[in-house]
Image: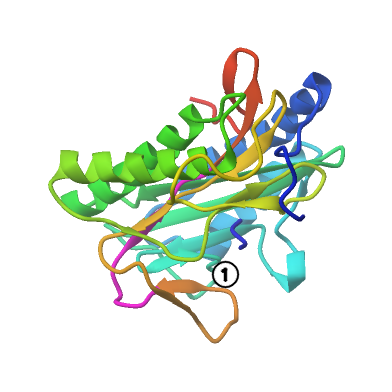
Amino acid sequence: MVFGRKNKKVVPFRTAGELDAMAAAGAIVGRALVAVRAAAKPGVSTLELDEVAEQTIRDAGAVPSFKGYHGFPGSICSSVNDRVVHGIPSKDEILAEGDLVSIDCGAILDGWHGDSAWTFGVGTLIEADRLLSEATRLSMEAGIEAMVAGNRLTDVSHAIELGTRAAEKQHGRAYGIVDGYGGHGIGRQMHMDPFLANEGAPGRGPKLVVGSVLAIEPMLTLGTTQTRVLEDDWTVVTEDGSRAAHWEHTVAVTEDGPRILTPRPE
């Protein structure tokens, strides 16, 4: 889930055992996302996807972290086509062939949070939408690679931005980096400082140390960088109606390099 402490000298860090506990929560999120994707077929409602995610999470002994968060009614955010983030699952929103679906999901296990998002197609996507999702994934992966001890917070931001620009060059088109939204610290709360922008100059902000954890989540569009919030006070849509994609993993800095704490089963 996306939301935008004072700037301290280091990004908050966890012990090795605490990272394992976070990874246990994150693995449940990964399983829920895989189950949701498997269920996402033409004729299925986004509320049905929400039910799949909640059942998967609760069957694993965890609690959906989104449900009731500041009043949010769902266990997932289901954001279809021009919806960027925070879409509310609904029995009236029925998936169709070619829809571009972004699912954001969180779970709490033994007090620790996992948070991850995935964009995929219902059936076959048109090429532009497929490449948009791929570009967002590549941007996230570039940010993950920057999760190494000694880097600063905005080194990760800059890496995400460079990942987007590399995808633009590879795909031969421009992408909009959604303005005002980004990643965040995470641990025993879902949203913690610092805020992680998805673009910007390197070399600024608190340092990453072994055990530092961030949720890395780029959001790209086929058009504008600007968004608006619908009357439900949650759903964020692109200002120009262009399609959007959202990828996210919870990631830790370790002595052996970045560790994804929200793995998805094959």
Q: Position of residue 260 (x, y in %)?
A: 58, 28
Pick the front one: 183 or 265: 183
Q: Is residue 239 magenta?
A: yes
Q: Which residue is mark 1?
A: 88
Residue 66 is a magenta residue: no
233 versus 120 height, above or below: below
**Residue drawn at point x = 63 percent, y = 26 percent:** 253
* Left or right, 233 with reference to 162: right
Residue 45 visible, this orientation: no
> Where the N terminus falls, by quadrant?
bottom right
Q: Nearer the viewer, residue 183 or 120?
A: 183
> Looking at the magenta stretch, what is its main secondary structure?
loop
Q: Which residues are magenta?
A: 238-248
Q: Which amino acid, by three-letter code, is at mark 1?
A: Ile
**Left or right of 135 in this view: 180:** right
Q: 156 or 63, which is in the foreground?
A: 156
Q: Residue at x 35, y 77 (%)?
A: 239
Task: Count the numbered circles shown.
Answer: 1
